[in-house]
Amino acid sequence: MQSLAPRENNLGPQSNLRNHLRFRPYFSLPFPGYWREDEMRQHWCFIGEIVQDVSLVRLSVNVRDVEGNELLVAFHTNDRGESFRARCMRGSTFVLLYAKQYNFVFGEHGFRIEEEHLPFLKVFDIPLESLLRINDKLHAGAYADQCGLCGKQGVSARCSGCSTVLYCGKRCQVSAWKAAVPPGGHKEECKILRALVWFTQRDWSTFNGKFRFA
Ligand SMILES: [Zn+2]
Ligand SMILES: [Zn+2]
């Protein structure tokens, strides 16, 4: 259970995961060498859901993007992806900043993950559909100024976990934590909103160097 804290809710420009200029399906990504590195002065990101583990000698997973394309992600890192194995579960969301298309020798499309990609790669323990559902609520202003449980207007105390959902008081917050709606209660919703904070606290419209996860 998180405590209540006052805080303003600011969504970064173009941080909506439905913005296809910033959050691109696979076939909208650039090819390697298509742009020179110094010409790529903009932010973009690939997001997909891990649908299958197809590992042989290295960690390899199939990822499905928002258009339904299935791609191969193969870890050619020093540890052959071992450090990501536990996180790359079916139903997790795979995010790769500044991703470019890659054609493997047997014709598959996808990403060949090298050591240099690791700061730009993140796997969230959340299905893509859940991430997008809460993203849509957030950007539609559903959490704007009313209690997340009883709907009372003009309240200002926020859950300190996600800094997003408002409650009129402790009682509503406690009930919401394990409520049936949304699925998993605010406990699950809070986790998803915390993941979204990484995206929403950034300005995706202005380039001052690359974003990175670590
Ligand atoms: Zn309330
Ligand atoms: Zn929360």
Image (cartoon, rainbow, N blue to C red):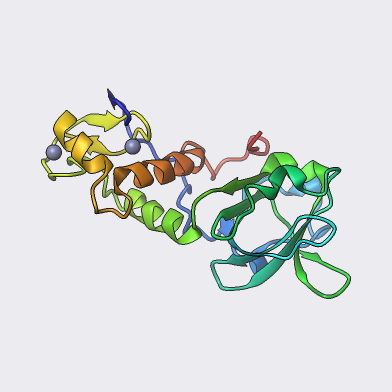
Residue 45 is situated, as x and y percent measured from the top left of the image, at 62, 52
Picture residue at 82% right of the left edge, 75% below the top:
107
Q: Is residue 116 above or below residue 28?
A: above
> Residue 63, position in %: x, y?
64, 64
Q: Quadrant of residue 145?
A: top left
Which quadrant of the frame does ligand 2 lie within?
top left
Q: Where does residue 197 sit, x and y in percent of width and height?
A: 45, 39
Residue 146, placed above or below residue 92: above
Quadrant holding the C terminus: top right
**Which quarter of the rendering shows the N terminus?**
top left
| Residue 25 sits in quarter | bottom right
Q: Residue at x 18, y 44 (%)?
A: 149
Nearest to the observer: residue 47 or residue 125: 125
Instruction: Pinpoint residue 152: horizontal percent, then vertical percent.
Output: 10, 41
| 106 versus 6 height, above or below | below
Look at 82% across and 43% down and name the residue there: 115
Farthest-out residue, right: 105
> As rendered, which of 68 and 34 lies closer to the eye?
68
Instruction: Answer yes or no: is residue 95 visible.
Output: yes
For the residue pair 54 and 209, the one nearer the viewer reads as 54
Q: Is residue 200 visible?
A: no
Left or right relative to 155: residue 82: right
Number of numbered labels in the structure image: 0
